[in-house]
Amino acid sequence: MPTPIVIEVGNLRLTAELSDTPTAQAIAGAPSQRTAFQTWGEGYIFPIAVDMPLEGAGTMNVNVGDLGYSPPQKTLTIFYGPTPASPGDRPVPPTKVNPVGRILDDPTLLRVVAGVGKIRLRRADSDGAAKPSGKSGLRRRS
């Protein structure tokens, strides 16, 4: 069963889900923290406290709104449009990734907050309200 999460960048809050793969579930169990991210074309790349191997052969085939984990760098990428490796409108990751989830809201909204510099992923309650994952000490927003 997918794990509902919330992605927060500045004042923007997007709902997303993590799949049932081993890597996605490791990410779901990682502590929530606010972390710096880099943009690579229309993708956010940031470190995540997970150390997982490439699942199967990995993939270079992703879509707008997908979340991909890169084992060599231990980073998560959120794809919201074309990247420098894209031949067209579809994103292409910088390395093979483990697909781990997808954004359920409009991922192109991330264009508006590209300069914010910090991102946070957290689990969501069953009603979709944000809640911290792990023991980060974060508080629920009202």
Image (spheres, grey):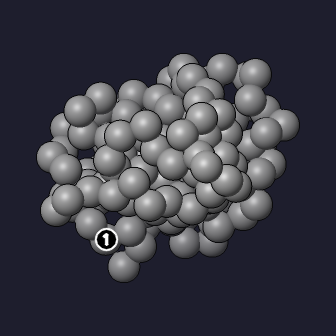
The residue under the point 35% across, 40% down is 95
The residue under the point 67% across, 39% down is 42
Kind of element beneath mark 1: loop
Horizontal side of 25 relative to 116 (left or right) equals: left
Along the line of sight, the residue nearer the viewer: 118 or 115: 115
Q: Residue 140 appears in which quarter of the rendering?
A: top right
The single residue placed furthest to the front in the displayed view is 87
The residue under the point 18% across, 45% down is 52
Along the line of sight, the residue nearer the viewer: 65 or 95: 95
> From the image, which quarter does the N terminus lie in?
bottom left
Horizontal and vertical percent for residue 80? 67, 49
- Seen in the picture, residue 77 relative to 28 is either above or below; the reply is above
Along the line of sight, the residue nearer the viewer: 37 or 89: 89
- For disc 1, the marked residue is 20
Horizontal side of 116 relative to 44 (left or right) equals: right
Horizontal and vertical percent for residue 55? 19, 58
The residue under the point 49% across, 59% down is 62
Q: Residue 12 appears in which quarter of the rendering?
A: top right
For residue 80, say whether it is visible.
no
Along the line of sight, the residue nearer the viewer: 121 or 83: 83
- Seen in the picture, residue 73 relative to 52 is either above or below; the reply is above
Horizontal and vertical percent for residue 47? 39, 28
